[in-house]
Amino acid sequence: MITMRKVEKHYQNFHALRDVNLDVRRGEVIAIIGPSGSGKSTLIRCINRLETISSGEIVVDGARVEAGKNLARVRAEVGMVFQQFNLFPHMSVLRNVAIAPIRVRGIAKAEAEQRARQLLERVGLAAHVDKYPDQLSGGQQQRVAIARALAMEPLVLLFDEPTSALDPEMVGEVLDVMQSLAATGVTMLVVTHEMGFARRVADRVVFMEAGQIIEQGAPNDLFDHP
Ligand code: ADP
Ligand code: ADP
């Protein structure tokens, strides 16, 4: 579903990505781990074109991401969940989840809100649909962000350290939601420091160092104590 070939990303003389090659199959869950500054975030940001690559090729569902003209398609097909939730503070939880389908896809408000309610139920927030983001805990806000990403029915969901901004007691509730998505076949690339998640939930773990993928494989083959 996603193919990266000989991808390079340079910032002036700095090589953030070097010769990155990666294939992601439909339904696969990939954990991307590695030291700070190793290029993990850059790698996934290139997939939805928050960053443009310097050379190489990225193909998502048959279309080249770097081609320039298909940005709207890329953004619709590739959902993203950030470390800092990035919810709209002036919109209710329900509105946050329904707004992109209404504005971007032209879905009728009632239908989009009905679907948003289902998604919020799926992430355990049915009781909070009329609240505003600042009335929720960090873990709840991140679950809204996941529901919002799912509302566009993306082919793949990218997560950029989704639990790093959370208080420790809220990490589990977000990982649990991600684990349940994985179990229902959602394709996911997850940049994370949560080794337990990488071990238990990921189909494949990708290790990065200095802009390169230095190793990848099934968690059982890569970790000593699966
Ligand atoms: P990671 O996610 O593994 O911590 P990043 O992908 O965020 O790493 O960053 C990789 C490297 O690229 C870092 O050294 C970072 O400083 C550098 N970098 C990221 N964005 C920019 C930018 N806009 N300009 C210059 N350097 C950048
Ligand atoms: P240890 O800290 O001894 O490695 P675990 O392997 O149980 O303990 O947990 C590792 C990480 O997995 C913890 O940071 C925890 O937050 C996270 N985690 C907790 N619940 C889940 C879950 N349901 N699915 C995946 N990861 C989880």
Image: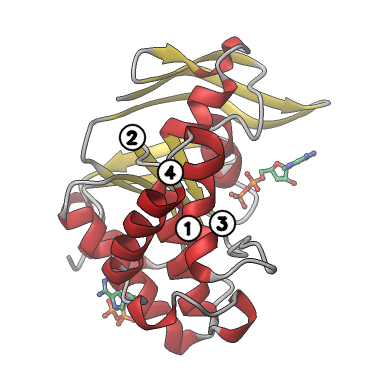
Q: Which mark is residue 13?
A: none
Q: Mark 2 or 1 closer to N-term?
A: 1
Q: Amino acid at mark 4?
A: Ala
In front of the other: label 4 or label 3? 4
Q: CA distance from mark 3 to mark 2?
A: 17 Å
Q: Left or right: 135 with respect to 190? A: right
Q: Mark 4 or 1 closer to N-term?
A: 1
Q: Amino acid at mark 1?
A: Val
Provide the residue designation for mark 4: 108
Question: Percent from the top left, x then y, of residue 194?
Answer: 40, 68
Q: Left or right: 211 with respect to 163? A: right
In front of the other: label 2 or label 4? 4
Q: CA distance from mark 2 to mark 4?
A: 22 Å
Name the residue: 50% across, 26% down: 74
Q: Mark 2 or 4 closer to N-term?
A: 4
Binning the other alpha carbons within 10 Å of mark 4 as few (below 14), some (14 to 19) or many (20 upward) gives: few
Provide the residue designation for mark 1: 97
Name the residue: 34% across, 70% down: 175
Provide the residue designation for mark 2: 155
The quadrant of the image that shows the C terminus is: bottom left
The quarter holding residue 154 reads top left
The quadrant of the image that shows the N terminus is: top left
Q: CA distance from mark 1 to mark 3?
A: 15 Å
Compared to residue 8, the image places residue 46 above or below, namely below
In front of the other: label 1 or label 3? 1
